[in-house]
Amino acid sequence: MLGWPPMKCPCGSEKNYSECCGIYHSGKETAPTAEALMRSRYAAFAKNQMQYLRDTTDPQSLGDIDDEANQEWAERAKFLKLEIVNAEEKANKGIVEFKAFYSVDDEDYVHHEVSTFRKQAGEWFFKSGKVKEEKKK
């Protein structure tokens, strides 16, 4: 049987991928919140779903996205886990602070970012992201 056992979603929800971010990646549904979109975008990187990343980026921000760099990173990185630090929504604006844990060539990294989202015609879109520097211990 194809796809058995069911694969856990990379976004960390503990749900099966097909019942979680897979619904958004397939186009059956759109992410209902900024946090759900953030999680589905992380899962898209983990599953190398580059078209989904383009489709969920605010059209005004598409020129700022380096598709080749994203593709290369998604192919080289092993995505370990996603940690949502904070998520807020006010009207049509959302902010999600997260940490994405991944490894490249057996080196572990943490990408800490605050992303902004915009809701347009009932659908959430990624607007921009600002990387936060990790404090050295």
Image (tube, rainbow, N blue to C red):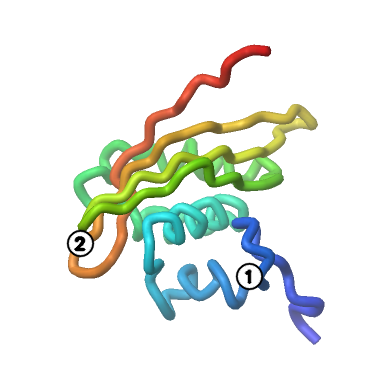
Question: Mark 2 highlights which residue?
Answer: 120
| In the image: residue 69, left or right of residue 18 | left
Label 1: state its secondary structure.
helix
Q: State the count of labels.
A: 2
Disc 2: CA contacts within 10 A as few (<14), some (14-19) or many (>=20): few
Q: Residue at x 66, y 70 (%)?
A: 15
The label on residue 68 is: none
| In the image: residue 94, left or right of residue 137 | left
Q: CA distance from mark 1 to mark 2?
A: 26 Å
Q: Amino acid at mark 2?
A: Gln
In the rendered view, tell whether residue 111 sits above or below residue 9. Answer: above
Q: Amino acid at mark 1?
A: Tyr
Q: Is residue 58 visible?
A: no
Please say if the residues under marks 1 and 2 sit with CB atoms less than 8 Å apart. no
Label 2: state its secondary structure.
strand
Q: Residue furthest bottom?
A: 1
Q: Residue at x 48, y 36 (%)?
A: 69
Question: Mark 1 highlights which residue?
Answer: 17
Q: Is residue 78 visible?
A: yes
Q: Quadrant of residue 137?
A: top right
In the rendered view, tell whether residue 87 sits above or below residue 52. Answer: above
Residue 97 locus on image (x, y percent): 45, 40
Q: Quadrant of residue 74?
A: top right
Among the two numbered marks 1 and 2 on one chain, the one whose residue lies closer to the N terminus? 1
Q: Residue at x 21, y 56 (%)?
A: 92
Quarter of the image with the N terminus is: bottom right
Disc 1: CA contacts within 10 A as few (<14), some (14-19) or many (>=20): many
